[in-house]
């Protein structure tokens, strides 16, 4: 149990109005959570303080050797005015798996949850209420030793910042176009692909720019060894419905284990839809599209929840899914997950946590 | 040609004395170079200012998505009091290749060199003169947009800091023990392995800790696809002398193209020693050790220049090289490269640049 000091802001910012448009990750609330780590002393000095800049030595390890991790989850306001978190335990578990992979000291799960709740509570008035909006929660840890040798840092900062965000697709659920990358690789087994750390995202930028320039919104990665098995989309896991069965790449060591991915698998099972986690070759998907058994494709992630995919390109090959529209399972998953998140659908699986 | 503003420190620090022990990357000089980038405005506001902390928003992209790069080179003081840089053009070329891979705007080569010279000139008095010491130069770039979306940043800081460093091996050239990693992978073709960016270093930490705990000083990486071809050592490239021929892994897209590596290849050719850059399987190395044709092993890098390798472990297999001593080619390379760097050996290849 953390002893969290609270220093309230003396200069509160203007909270966006109900009708103000919200984008993603551009405005931040009045407060932030900070906790420090030092070898021998452990995690200490937990505090909620006014949102403020971070001051670091130019030699701080995070600037040089990428020892940094993050998580992303959301808080929602229900019609009754309650504040709900969606499966924060899953994010916290994953955070500590990331920490272990990149030699950052873990944080006790109950302390992590307490920290999230404390800062969300402080800025509860910032949670937007309009359909599709939420308060995005970004916990992250950075290595702060002022030392240029390559080794795990002895000091860290754990920080949580909050950003009110709009609906990912302002005009409602909208199918996206996906670029299948055949030149660059995001991650490989034995590497850091299943950790939520900056190195995986920086590796994706060049493909993302290439895809955007060609009119595509996201990149689908293939495996780094054989370059034929489907891994994930940059910010999402990916699902295919083929001939009545839902398939998604198995967690193989190079894929991020998504919380929404896990939730979608659980819901499909609940609904009696067969789900398989397995190795999926890109050839099999194109063949299913060709012979008419590819029924739906969608991505899952915290930001957009469910993103129907309407179009995929792999070199010269293009496939169209659902005539570019939204499939019934994609729609039902979106309605159910966002319904549970906002308290509109009964949470029979015990996924929400009240702040 | 940059217009570099100079703000001299008003609180100079104590420069270490001639006999003070120096380590690596722990103390920094009085000044640093800074230049900012903004889309539409380009690189601007070049300045040499007092060494000072960096102040960033907690949402700054470098903390979340690893968009950061660095370089490492050294300045040396000759017996005549000249200040020499060693092949800075190679570091600058590589810096811009890294920039292109991770979507950071490039810096004109002549501006980059001018920036290095300006800050080294400002702190010339900090260059240590004792055998084996030098002024380590660390240029780096960080992404500073206060935005949580994943895309290349629109703003950056380019910074150069300086650190007087001691001899890498205080007791002179000393063979190291190398751990061959068979579980984790550093990089794979198509990824960011040939870029000098934090993501590659964070990926290496867990193996490094494992190797250190077992009494080994460095990790040798195998390829991420077949797990049998030799890539590089964490902070060095690797060379083997087998039956009179020097071999080193070819630059295959996942290996860092080292400046010392390039210099060693050039010197061997100069000396008439056959050199081959090729795919090298770990089995071939163990076989050469077994049949007595493995004559020398050494690593190359800016920090230690040449590191003779005396011992390698691959799972249960152990090999001893040169009875754990230093081979004649390793020694000659070390003497020649450090000799050229410090002006003691004639620079017939035009590698040094005077500040």
Image: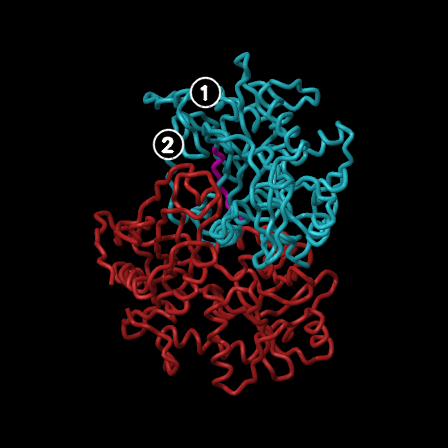
Chain colours: A red, B cyan
Location of residue A215 with respect to B345 vertically, above or below:
below
x 61%, y 64%: residue: A177
Front residue (pair A5, A178): A5
Left or right relative to A244: residue A130: left
- Asked which secondary structure carries label 1, the reply is helix
Location of residue B56 with respect to B313 vertically, above or below:
above
How many labels, in total?
A: 2
Left or right relative to A284: residue A199: left
| Subunit of label 1 | B
User: Residue reaching furthest top?
Assistant: B80
- Asked which secondary structure carries label 2, the reply is loop
| Subunit of label 2 | B
For label 2, the residue is: B52
Q: Is residue A261 visible?
A: yes
For label 1, the residue is: B122
Q: Is B58 a magenta residue? A: no
x 60%, y 46%: residue: B311
Q: Is B155 a magenta residue? A: yes
Which quarter of the figure has residue B302?
top right
| Number of other residues with Cα within 10 Å of mark 1, as a class: few under 14, some 14 to 19, many 20 or more | some
User: Residue reaching furthest bottom?
Assistant: A272
Q: Earlier in the sequence, mark 1 or mark 2?
A: 2
3D distance between C-alphas at marks 1 and 2: 15 Å
State the image coordinates of residue B330 (x, y, percent, origin top left).
65, 33
Q: Is residue B95 visible?
A: no
Front residue (pair A200, A78): A200
State the image coordinates of residue A167 (x, y, percent, origin top left).
44, 64
Residue stretch in magenta: B152-159
């Amino acid at each position: 149990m953390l002893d969290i000091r609270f220093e309230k802001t003396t200069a509160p910012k203007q909270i966006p109005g109900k009708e103000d448009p919200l984008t993603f990750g551009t405005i931040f609330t009045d407060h932030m959570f900070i906790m420090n780590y030092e070898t021998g002393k452990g995690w200490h000095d937990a505090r909620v303080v006014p949102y403020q800049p971070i001051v670091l030595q130019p030699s701080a390890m995070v600037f040089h050797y990428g020892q940094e991790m993050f998580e992303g989850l959301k808080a929602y306001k229900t019609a009754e005015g309650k504040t709900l978190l969606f499966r924060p335990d899953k994010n916290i578990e994953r955070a500590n798996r990331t920490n272990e992979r990149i030699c950052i000291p873990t944080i006790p799960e109950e302390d992590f949850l307490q920290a999230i709740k404390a800062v969300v509570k402080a800025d509860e008035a910032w949670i937007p209420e309009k359909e599709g909006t939420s308060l995005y929660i970004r916990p992250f840890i950075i290595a702060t030793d002022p030392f240029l040798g390559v080794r795990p840092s002895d000091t860290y900062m754990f920080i949580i910042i909050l950003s009110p965000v709009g609906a990912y697709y302002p005009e409602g659920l909208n199918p996206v176009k996906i670029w299948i990358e055949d030149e660059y690789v995001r991650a490989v087994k034995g590497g850091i692909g299943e950790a939520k750390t900056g190195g995986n995202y920086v590796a994706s930028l060049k493909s993302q720019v290439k895809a955007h320039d060609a009119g595509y919104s996201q990149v689908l990665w293939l495996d780094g060894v054989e370059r034929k098995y489907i891994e994930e989309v940059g910010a999402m896991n990916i699902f295919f419905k083929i001939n009545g069965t839902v398939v998604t790449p198995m967690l193989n060591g190079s894929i991020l284990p998504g919380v929404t991915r896990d939730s979608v698998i659980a819901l499909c099972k609940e609904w009696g839809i067969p789900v398989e986690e397995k190795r999926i070759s890109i050839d099999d998907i194109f063949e299913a599209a060709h012979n008419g058994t590819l029924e739906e494709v969608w991505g899952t992630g915290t930001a957009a929840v469910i993103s129907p995919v309407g179009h995929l390109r792999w070199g010269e090959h293009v496939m169209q899914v659902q005539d570019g529209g939204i499939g019934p399972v994609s729609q039902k998953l979106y309605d159910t997950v966002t319904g549970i998140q906002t308290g509109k659908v009964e949470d029979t699986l015990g996924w929400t946590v009240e702040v």
